[in-house]
Amino acid sequence: MGAVACFFESPWNRVSPALTEHARGLLLAAAGYSLRALGRVAEAVEPMRANLEMCVEQKEWLNASLGAENLSGLKLALGEVAAAVEHAQACMTYAERTDDAFRRMVGRATLAHALHQAAIGPRRRRFLRTPSRGRPPASLPIR
């Protein structure tokens, strides 16, 4: 964490402008992931959110999907289930914009997990069974 912190002007929310946009995004993602791993869950929110915004602005849909997935899990850990569902829906939306079948499957699983935590069963099953962009589902249907 000490090495990552050196690149921040303000801890976990403002990365040095001397770095490239891509490097700033990587550092935000690394900081958020590391903070969460260290149990500093509340502190991890801001760098993860900032990284997600950067990915969306740059239309990096695979990384945006991954960032939204991480934020959904983080929000679940904080007990913010409604926010977790919103991020999980974003994860699935961004995943659908990629050609990565695994990422689309993970997007659906992330949403199903968040909806399960929110106790929204029928809606969860509908998202899992709907084929993405005319393709067969990436996983077996839930019955």
Image: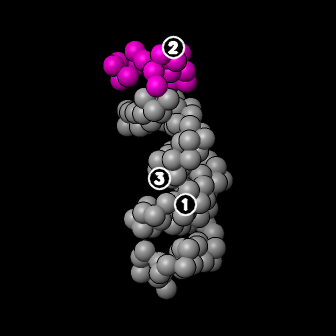
- Badge number at residue 97: 1
- Badge number at residue 117: none
**Residue drawn at x 41%, y 37% as measured from the top left:** 33
Question: 10 Å neighbourhood of mark 1: few (<14), some, or many (≥20)?
Answer: some
Q: In the depicted view, which residue is nearer to us: 131 or 87? A: 131
The image shows residue 134 at horizontal and vertical percentages of 55, 79
Q: In the depicted view, which residue is nearer to us: 117 or 30? A: 30
The image shows residue 69 at horizontal and vertical percentages of 50, 52
Within the image, what quadrant is residue 57 found in? Answer: top right
Q: Is residue 38 magenta?
A: no
Separation of residues labelled 2 and 3 (CA atoms): 28 Å
**Residue drawn at x 38%, y 22% as measured from the top left:** 4
Q: Which residue is mark 3?
A: 62
**Residue drawn at x 51%, y 14% as measured from the top left:** 9
The image shows residue 76 at horizontal and vertical percentages of 54, 50
Amino acid type for the residue under numbered disc 1: Arg
Residue 84 in sight in this render:
no
Residue 115 position (above or below residue 39): below
Separation of residues labelled 2 and 1 (CA atoms): 34 Å
Question: 10 Å neighbourhood of mark 2: few (<14), some, or many (≥20)?
Answer: few
Labels 2 and 1: the sequence-earlier one:
2
The image shows residue 127 at horizontal and vertical percentages of 58, 73
Q: Which residue is mark 2?
A: 9
Q: Is residue 18 magenta?
A: yes
Q: In the depicted view, which residue is nearer to us: 23 or 111? A: 23
Q: Secondary structure at mark 3?
A: helix
Amino acid type for the residue under numbered disc 2: Glu
* Side of 107 relative to 30 (left or right): right
Labels 3 and 1: the sequence-earlier one:
3
Amino acid type for the residue under numbered disc 3: Leu
Magenta extent:
1-20
